[in-house]
Structure formats: structure tokens, C-alpha cells
């Protein structure tokens, strides 16, 4: 049997400033008909670049400098642009990471769906519309007859991702490249999309390259796995072998990340005054209510993880605590004292005591300021230090976050890696010498190894400085790693709260149960077992809808 | 749709408010011009009595606030007042013949001519710039793109009268295909009118194309890095289809705004071109009226210019809103 895709010794370069830097350094890849290959690695490993190269496509500023790509006997690198356009969409399709960004906002879903078949001359428009509805039905989209006639912004993220899979299927291609298709989704939504994708790829016997950084996800989807590190192949093996017996140290380290877990701290005295007490807080954006009677306490030296899906009100709660969004009802207490609702009415000291670390370190740091200035600003503003004292304090803070001061103090944020930027965010929060820090999804944009480093750093700082954390996250592995107590939120309400120990041991609220059971596990049979156990109609959004 | 109608009504109300504020500005500015109609028409040797008499006749002796509200009240009822210059000064001589020209009568034909010229120019310039912009985006950084950029930029950078004379030289003198004088008048057939208007329209096209073409090009190129454009490419769509079908609909808002600004310019700012081609538009009338301090005409012209700007921008706003499916089809 000849392979469907053959990539031989491919070299791909990316341009940075005026020089070409290697992204992929001599990787081979073979994919047979109907086979699913998982491509995993951290960001910057070259997964997407390699995936796109399998389509004979490179992004602007990227070039293929050596090797061959053969698709079904056709040399894609030698093929003319017109010849490649004939294959793309028709025989090779692509499913992008963010369906919300990859659907054209100006056209209805069905028009985008039929574009491929009509332009490639595979089907007439009306045939393709019928086929689209059938695909939507197979992918278990709600209202398959009608959903295609909506615009992308009228459809939820998980549904869009399935509509995009349907679009990729529209010409019945031989190969689909899935580029992190569930990374931007909530766990309960992700599981539904995973199940749909796996089903349809099976049904049509489509070959696929599944790109992801999530090992547990790839374990469910792929027949074989290839691990990439900085543009080099680390190893490749079939999924079960790879999971049970990884050969290389790097693969083993990836596997081990999920093991980090902090012991839970003993319960707090019931009489102790909490550092932060959120009491019966309700809040609204304009007329739209988003929080309903939210109450929880955060004690000294403890971490409270606030868990929930997007739109559940986690970040809004943080905005109420910081005074950015005054609550419509209820109060926020700090050390037993009620805080003014609006941050403008709070004293400098009240402001100093509560700091924030953000999800996107990239956008939370001023790109035109040097590290010394970014951290120096709160040092000067809150602590009143200037000149040499200020610089010394900044140096101390940099040492605290494990970055050598002399080397980093004069750099710009663009000269740091993602994890280092997040560390600067932490140092900036520490500069105010707060008692309480809100960490808003601080690790969700980071690779697992880097995220683990950040979590360990936060844990050590908590022990050293007696900090209290409110840890907003949707990732239950992170909760397991760092939380003492957990608050589960859904649609602006607290559905369950308790210690971490209670949370991970049944019985619990059905929603918590659903959240927990939706987190993919490393077992390749996990998704199959779960579907058998629950049935396709009791996972994901469908299950969430049943609850409310 | 509800929300769109509300937004449009809001914009309309805001437009009217702006127009009101502009009317105050116009009135104040015109009154700050040194000298008045009486002094201008009677010359340096005028006796104070004669000047005072004309002022009294025209109501110029009233306090400015009274005059403003008289003017505004009239304008609201569609009466823009009487032209000073065309007024019959019989009353000054002791007898009232009752014949005088209203501002509306004086402006109407001129304004119609200006609108005709603007419309002809728009019909040529807008499609031309859009197509050039799309092609420049499609073949970006090619020789064609650069040539288009250089040509349109040089034409926008040259003085209008220079462009006008160059066109006259090539199209009227060396190859006499078009008339160099655009003296249009009532009773001309549409074809004749069009022929006479073509040369000024072409000159104005050269003036406004660069702006619209460059915005079209920039707005499209700005979107080419979007994930949905990459998606369209990965679906095997041709470069032309990617740009026209996938990029352009999302680039409309900024393009529409620039088109509106340029159309407003065509209505309000074409004095030089009118003078060169002796085209009887509103621009010439305006300049003449300022010279002789014919205040009602000046004010009426200003008000028309302001209304044109406000209306066209309002229209652009509304079209931009309608080009956005998020607003057309809320969740």
C-alpha cells in the first residue's frame, strides 16, 4: 500500500527580522489512508507549520527550504499554485484552532460550507446544502436544518468548531488537518467536539493529522503519535505504546507534568477572619445580570480555586473584588472591613492589598517599557521608593521570581519567553506587597512544562509571604495542583464549594461531576468508555442544558 | 433590526444637533468678517447716512442674536432670505417695486449643477478607485501596485488647476475630443451636459481617486492576515475570490467612510476646478458672495456645505452599520 502523505526530510524556515531561522529541521512523516496521526509538542515546536506543510502550504514569512511533500503520488512542492488549489479543500481540508476567527464573519455558515463543493465542481449548491444539513445532523449539532443559515457570531464556539469540521468534510477529502481544534473550548464542550470529530473521521475513513499540545486529547483521537521538540522529531510510535512506554526523556517529562500536586493545607479555624470575604454579591453589565448572590471566603495563606466554564462569572467576580465593577448588591470585605464598591473610592492602601495577575502576559505588559520600569512603577507608586532604592527593590523582586536581575532588568517584554513574561506579571503584583492576589487563568496560555514552573513558583511565594490567592481557572488539573478550596460556578451562581479533597471525591453536585468527568484522561479508551457509560446525549452542552 | 433602527435614529438626532451647532458657528464666523455689505457696495466715499440707510433696509442694524434667530427661523421654514446683491434698492430711492431675488432662487440652479458634477465624478471615481484598490491588493508589492500608488499619489499631490490644464492640453487642445469650457445652461440635453461636464469630472476623479483607492487597498490588506482569509486559501479558493468574496465584505466600513468624505469634498470644495472650466457651480457663487459680503447667500452656502458633510457621513455610518452582520443579525 502506498502512503497517502509522504513527507521526506523536510526543512522549513521562518523569517525573523532579516534572517531565516529554521522551524522544522529534517522531519519525516508517513500517513496511510484512513489513519490518524497525532502531532504533539509545545508551542514553537513547529506542529502547525508541519501540518500546513503537509498541505503544501506555508504562511507568509515561512518557506520550505528542503525535502519533499507527496500527496497521493503528487509532488506538492513542485505543483503549480493552480494545481494545489484544485487539491486544497477538495482532497485535503483544514480545521483551524479558533472556529470563531476562521469562519468569515460576513457570510452565513452554509454559504461558507457550500463554497468548496461548488467552486471545486463537486456538487451543485442545492446538493451541497442538503449534504451540509446531513453532516450537521451527524455531528449532532442542534437544529441541523436551520443552524447553517446563521452567521458565525450567532453560534456558540463548540458548535462552530463542529460546523467547521462539517465544512472540512464537505468535499469528502482524503485528508484533514486538525490544528488544535478544541484548545479554545471548555472541557464539557471539548468532549462533545472530540466525540463528533472521531465519529465522522471513522465513518468516512478519512486520514487525519491531529495537532495538539494536550496529550490526553491526542490519546483519544490518534492511531499513532509523533512528538516534536523545537522542530525535531523526538519519537513516533502507535498510541498505546507511546503512552505506556515512552522512550525518550523529553516524552517522559511531558507525561510527568500532570503529576504535580500540592498537599492540602489543614482547615482554617472557623473563628478566623478571612482575608477576603465575598458576601452575597450580585452584579450586572448594564441591564444583563451576570452574578447572583455569590459568597465565599479566602483565608490567609490559602488558595481558593474558582472553577467554571467561560461565561460562568469567574472573571466578573474578580472585577467586583477589585472594584472595577461595583456590585449591584452585597459587599466585599477585606480583613473584616467592608471595601468601598468602586475602586475610585478605595484608599491607596486598600488598592495595594489586592493585586492581579492576568491570563495574557503578552498584553498585560507594556511592550515599550523595560522590565525595570514595569516592576518599578508599583514599587514607586505604592511603596514610595525612588532612585537606587527602587532599583534595588526591583532586583530583589526579580530574584524572587527566579530571574537573574542583571540579565533581565533592562530587557523589553518582547525579549522574554511566555513563561518569563508571566513571571514578570507576578513580580509586578508582588511589588505592591499585597496580602491577596487574584490569578486569572495565569497558566492557560502556557505550555504544560512552563505552567508547572509558574504553579510551583506561586506555591513557594505563598509559603514565604503568607499570600492568599484567588485562582480563576477552567482547568481541573491546575485545581488539583494548587488549590486548598474550590468554588464551582455556573451561570453566575456558586453551585458547590468546599475543600479540594471534598471536591475530588464523590458525591458532588451533578455539574461538578460533569466537569470532572469531562476532563480527558491519558487512557486511550477513556472517551469510548465514557460515551458507552453516559451515552452521546449526556455529554457536553446537551448535559449542561439538561441541568438548567 | 430593532437595534439598528435605534442606532440610525440616534445618529440622525446627533446629525441635526451638529447642524444646529454648525449654524451658530457659521453665523458667528460670517459676522466676524471685516466690513459689511453696505460698506462693500457703497465703496470708500459712502456717507455714513447712506451706509446706515442700507443697513436699516437689510436689517443689519439689529443686534446679532435677533438676526441669528430671524435667519434660523426662516431657514427652518425653508426661507433662506433674500440675496443682498440682487435686492432691489428701490426702497432706498424712495419707492418699493417689490422685486427681489430670494437666496433659494439664486442657489438652486447652481447647486443642481454642482450636484450633477459631483454625481458624474462619483460615478467614474468610486468604481474606478475600488477596482484599482482591489487589483492593487491582489497584486500587492508588484510593479502594478507600485505604479498605481505612485500615479495616484502624484495626481493628489498636484494642484487641481495644474491637473485641469494638463487634461485640457491633452483632451481639448492636442486631441480635441472634449470641450474645454463647461458653460452649461438650462435647456441643454442630458448628453450635451454630460459632454461638457466630463473634463471637470475627470479632473476631480484624479483628485479623489488616490484617497479611496489607497484605503481600499489598505483595508483589504489589513485583513489578509486574518484566520478566515487563511481558511479561504486553504479551501483552494482563487486569490481574486479570496479578496472579493472574503476580504472585501469585511473591509467595507472604512472604505465607505472614505468614499463619503470624498463625495462631501466634491460638493463643497471644487471652486478651483469650477473657475478653470467656467462651470457655473455653487463654489463660484460662494466665493463671489463672500467678496461682496452678501451674507444671506454666504450663510446659505455654508449651511448647505455643512448639511452635505453631515448627511454623507451619516449615510456612511448607516451603511457601515448595515455592512456588519453582527448588528444586522443580533444573537
Image (cartoon, coloured by chain):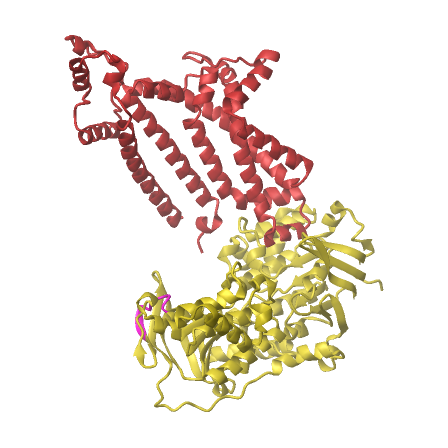
Image-based side of B319 in relation to B229, left or right: left
Which chain did the renderer colour red? B
The percent coordinates of residue A109 (x first, y second) are 56, 53
Residue A433 vs B315, above or below: the answer is: below
Q: Magenta stretch: dominant SS?
A: loop
Residue B230 vs B83, above or below: the answer is: below
The answer to whether residue A57 is seen in the rendering is no
The image quarter containing residue B144 is: top right
Q: Dividing the image into 4 quarters, which one contains the N terminus of chain A?
A: bottom right
In this view, the residue in front, B318 or B226, is B226
Residue B152 vs B324, above or below: the answer is: above
State the hue of chain A.
yellow
The percent coordinates of residue A129 (x first, y second) are 60, 51
Image-based side of B322 in relation to A27, left or right: left
Residue that appears at 49% across and 79% down: A512
The percent coordinates of residue A343 (x first, y second) are 34, 67
Image-based side of A332 in relation to B319, left or right: left
Let me know if residue A329 is in the magenta part: yes
Q: Dividing the image into 4 quarters, which one contains the C terminus of chain A?
A: bottom left
In the image as oriented, which residue stretches furthest toward the front?
A388
Q: Which residues are magenta?
A: A323-331
Let me know if residue B29 is in the magenta part: no
Residue that appears at 40% across and 84% down: A299
Residue that appears at 74% across and 45% down: A82
Residue that appears at 53% across and 66% down: A371
The answer to whether residue B129 is seen in the rendering is yes
The percent coordinates of residue A431 (x first, y second) are 46, 73
Image-based side of A247 in relation to B42, left or right: right
Amino acid at each position: 500500500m502506498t502512503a497517502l502523505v509522504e513527507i521526506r526530510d523536510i526543512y522549513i524556515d521562518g523569517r525573523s527580522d532579516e534572517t531565516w531561522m529554521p522551524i522544522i529541521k529534517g522531519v519525516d512523516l508517513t500517513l496511510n489512508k484512513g489513519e490518524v496521526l497525532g502531532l504533539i509538542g509545545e508551542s514553537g515546536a513547529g506542529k502547525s507549520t508541519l501540518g500546513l506543510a503537509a498541505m503544501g502550504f506555508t504562511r507568509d514569512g515561512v518557506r520550505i527550504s528542503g525535502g519533499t511533500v507527496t500527496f497521493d503520488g503528487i509532488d506538492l512542492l513542485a505543483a503549480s499554485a493552480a494545481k494545489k488549489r484544485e487539491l486544497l479543500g477538495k482532497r485535503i481540508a483544514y480545521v483551524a484552532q479558533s472556529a470563531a476567527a476562521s469562519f468569515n464573519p460576513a457570510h452565513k455558515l452554509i454559504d461558507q460550507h457550500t463554497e468548496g463543493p461548488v467552486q471545486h465542481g463537486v456538487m451543485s449548491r442545492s446538493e451541497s446544502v442538503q449534504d451540509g444539513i446531513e453532516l450537521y445532523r451527524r455531528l449532532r449539532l442542534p437544529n441541523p436544518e436551520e443552524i447553517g443559515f446563521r452567521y458565525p457570531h450567532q453560534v456558540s464556539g463548540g458548535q462552530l468548531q463542529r460546523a467547521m469540521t462539517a465544512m472540512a468534510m464537505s468535499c469528502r477529502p482524503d485528508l484533514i488537518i486538525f490544528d488544535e481544534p478544541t484548545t479554545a473550548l471548555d472541557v464539557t464542550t471539548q468532549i462533545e467536539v472530540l466525540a463528533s470529530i472521531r465519529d465522522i473521521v471513522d465513518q468516512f475513513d478519512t486520514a487525519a493529522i491531529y495537532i495538539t499540545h494536550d496529550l490526553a486529547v491526542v490519546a483519544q483521537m490518534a492511531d499513532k503519535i509523533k512528538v516534536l521538540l523545537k522542530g525535531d522529531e523526538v519519537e513516533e510510535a502507535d498510541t498505546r505504546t507511546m503512552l505506556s512506554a515512552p522512550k525518550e526523556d523529553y516524552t517522559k517529562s511531558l507525561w510527568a507534568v500532570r503529576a504535580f500536586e500540592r498537599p492540602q493545607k489543614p482547615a482554617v479555624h472557623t473563628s478566623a477572619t478571612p482575608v477576603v470575604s465575598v458576601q452575597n454579591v450580585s452584579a450586572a453589565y448594564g441591564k444583563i445580570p451576570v452574578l447572583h448572590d455569590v459568597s465565599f471566603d479566602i483565608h490567609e495563606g490559602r488558595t481558593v480555586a474558582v472553577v467554571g466554564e467561560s461565561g460562568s462569572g469567574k472573571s466578573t467576580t474578580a472585577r467586583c473584588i477589585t472594584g472595577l465593577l461595583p456590585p449591584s448588591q452585597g459587599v466585599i470585605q477585606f480583613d473584616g472591613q467592608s471595601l468601598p464598591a468602586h475602586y475610585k473610592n478605595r484608599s491607596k492602601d486598600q488598592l495595594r492589598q489586592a493585586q492581579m495577575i492576568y491570563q495574557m502576559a503578552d498584553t498585560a505588559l507594556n511592550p515599550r517599557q523595560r522590565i525595570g520600569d514595569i516592576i518599578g512603577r508599583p514599587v514607586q507608586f505604592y511603596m514610595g521608593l525612588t532612585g537606587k532604592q527602587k532599583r534595588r527593590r526591583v532586583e530583589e523582586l526579580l530574584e524572587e521570581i527566579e530571574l537573574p536581575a542583571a540579565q533581565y532588568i533592562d530587557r523589553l517584554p518582547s525579549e522574554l519567553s511566555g513563561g518569563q513574561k508571566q513571571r514578570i506579571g507576578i513580580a509586578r503584583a508582588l511589588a505592591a506587597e499585597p496580602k491577596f492576589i487574584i490569578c486569572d487563568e495565569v497558566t492557560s496560555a502556557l505550555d504544560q512544562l512552563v505552567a508547572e514552573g509558574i504553579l510551583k513558583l506561586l506555591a513557594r511565594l505563598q509559603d514565604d509571604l503568607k499570600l492568599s490567592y484567588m485562582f480563576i481557572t477552567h482547568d481541573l488539573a491546575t485545581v488539583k495542583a494548587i488549590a486548598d478550596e474550590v468554588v464551582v460556578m455556573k451561570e453566575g451562581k456558586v453551585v458547590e464549594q468546599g475543600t479540594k479533597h471534598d471536591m475530588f471525591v464523590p458525591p458532588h453536585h451533578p455539574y461538578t461531576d460533569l466537569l470532572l468527568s469531562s476532563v480527558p484522561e491519558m487512557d486511550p479508551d477513556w472517551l469510548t468508555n465514557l460515551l458507552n457509560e453516559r451515552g452521546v446525549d449526556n455529554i457536553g452542552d446537551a448535559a449542561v442544558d439538561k441541568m438548567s | 433590526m430593532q437595534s439598528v433602527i435605534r442606532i440610525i435614529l440616534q445618529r440622525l438626532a446627533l446629525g441635526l444637533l451638529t447642524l444646529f451647532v454648525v449654524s451658530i458657528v457659521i453665523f458667528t464666523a460670517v459676522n466676524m468678517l471685516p466690513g459689511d455689505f453696505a460698506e462693500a457696495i457703497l465703496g470708500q466715499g459712502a456717507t455714513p447716512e447712506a451706509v446706515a440707510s442700507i443697513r436699516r433696509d437689510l436689517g443689519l442694524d439689529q443686534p446679532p442674536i435677533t438676526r441669528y434667530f430671524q435667519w434660523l427661523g426662516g431657514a427652518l421654514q425653508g426661507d433662506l432670505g433674500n440675496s443682498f446683491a440682487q435686492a432691489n434698492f428701490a426702497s432706498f430711492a424712495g419707492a418699493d417695486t417689490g422685486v427681489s431675488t430670494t437666496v433659494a432662487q439664486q442657489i438652486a440652479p447652481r447647486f443642481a449643477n454642482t450636484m450633477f458634477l459631483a454625481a458624474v465624478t462619483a460615478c467614474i471615481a468610486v468604481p474606478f478607485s475600488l477596482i484599482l484598490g482591489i487589483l492593487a491588493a491582489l497584486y500587492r508589492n508588484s510593479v502594478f501596485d507600485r505604479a498605481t500608488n505612485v500615479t495616484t499619489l502624484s495626481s493628489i499631490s498636484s494642484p487641481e488647476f495644474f491637473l485641469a490644464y494638463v487634461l485640457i492640453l491633452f483632451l481639448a487642445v492636442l486631441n480635441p475630443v472634449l470641450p474645454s469650457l463647461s458653460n452649461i445652461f438650462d435647456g441643454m440635453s442630458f448628453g450635451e451636459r454630460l459632454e461638457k461636464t466630463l473634463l471637470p469630472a475627470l479632473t476631480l476623479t484624479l483628485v479623489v481617486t488616490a484617497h479611496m483607492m489607497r484605503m481600499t487597498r489598505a483595508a483589504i490588506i489589513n485583513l489578509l492576515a486574518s484566520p478566515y482569509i487563511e481558511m479561504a486559501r486553504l479551501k483552494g479558493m482563487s486569490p481574486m475570490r479570496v479578496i472579493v468574496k472574503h476580504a472585501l465584505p469585511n473591509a467595507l466600513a472604512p472604505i465607505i467612510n472614505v468614499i463619503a468624505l470624498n463625495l462631501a469634498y466634491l460638493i463643497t470644495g471644487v471652486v478651483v476646478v469650477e473657475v478653470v472650466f467656467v462651470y457655473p457651480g455653487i463654489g463660484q457663487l460662494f466665493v463671489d458672495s463672500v467678496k461682496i459680503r452678501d451674507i444671506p447667500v454666504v450663510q446659505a452656502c455654508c449651511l448647505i456645505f455643512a448639511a452635505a458633510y453631515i448627511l454623507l457621513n451619516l449615510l456612511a455610518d448607516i451603511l457601515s452599520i448595515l455592512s456588519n452582520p453582527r448588528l444586522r443579525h443580533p444573537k
